[in-house]
Image (tube, grey):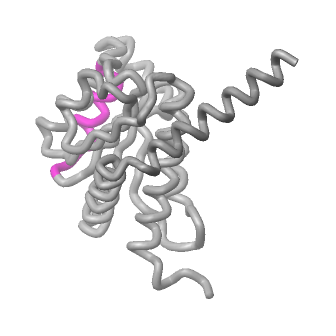
Amino acid sequence: MANGNLLTNCVAEAQRTVTALAQNAALLNDVERCTQACIATLRAKGKILIAGNGGSAADAQHFAGELVSRFYFDRPALAAVALTTDTSVLTAIGNDYGYEEVFARQIQALGLPGDVFIAISTSGTSPNILKALTQARQQGLRIIGLTGRSGGKMKALCDICICAPSDSTPRIQECHLVLEHALCACIEEALFGSQRPA
């Protein structure tokens, strides 16, 4: 019975958090700004780089996968790279330069002015994300952050920072997934909506 109550409470809390997200006009305006930044970059033949740790690493890979493969319908692939997937690169950088550099070093190698860097951190304080944000700014990338309510230290380093309306890591992650799916849907529709099958 206790587990049933816990399940009910978790689902109810998730629902409240996503509802708060949907009712926050300023936050939704920032999501629209993120969408437009990604669309502009992809139209200009730029790319989207994405990074995060733990569950946020999984989000980075999920988001990149939806863009490179497809979301709602078949269409040309979109240039997106999760900086969390190459174990040889990650372990080489971690060994040679330290874990704080694992994303910054990849941005140094791959990032070009006009590209978008999406940084995902529920706390907004992950050292390797903060280093990556600084590197991205130095190289002229457009910077988008996904984090929790406070924004942490990363908020000041982003061009646009979307702060999920929660202090709970699971709820923040759930909001991030909703936002990532919304971004994928809007990007795909803006670029290829005319090719959507009838």
Q: Residue shown at 36%/53% (left/top)?
A: 28
Question: Horizontal placement of 106 versus 85: left or right?
Answer: left
Question: Toward the viewer: 22 or 105?
Answer: 22
Quarter in which the C terminus is drawn: bottom right
> Quick check: can you spot residue 57?
no
Residue 143 included in the magenta stretch of the image? no
Residue 58 vs residue 146: left or right? right
Image coordinates of residue 13 in percent, x first then y, are: 60, 31
Q: Main secondary structure of the magenta part?
A: helix
Magenta range: 101-113
* Residue 107 within the segment the image draws in magenta: yes
Rendered location of residue 86, percent (x, y): 48, 33
Q: Position of residue 71 (x, y in %)?
A: 56, 62
> Vertically, is 9 above or below 39?
above
Outermost right residue: 1
Give the quarter of the figure containing the N terminus.
top right
Taking the spot 46% from the left edge, 50% from the top edge, the residue there is: 22
Viewer-nearest residue: 38 or 84:
38
What residue is at 26 percent from the left and 64 percent from the top? 40
Can you tell which quarter of the image residue 109 is in?
top left
Number of numbered discs overlaid on the protein picture: 0
- Relative placement, left or right, of 140 versus 191 is left
Residue 98, image x, y percentages? 32, 12
Task: Return the residue nearer the eye: 80 or 186.
Answer: 186
29 left or right of 120 in image: left
Q: Quadrant of residue 70?
A: bottom right
Image quadrant where residue 157 sits? top left
- Residue 124 visible in rendering: yes
Residue at the spot 47% in from the left edge and 49% down from the top edge = 180
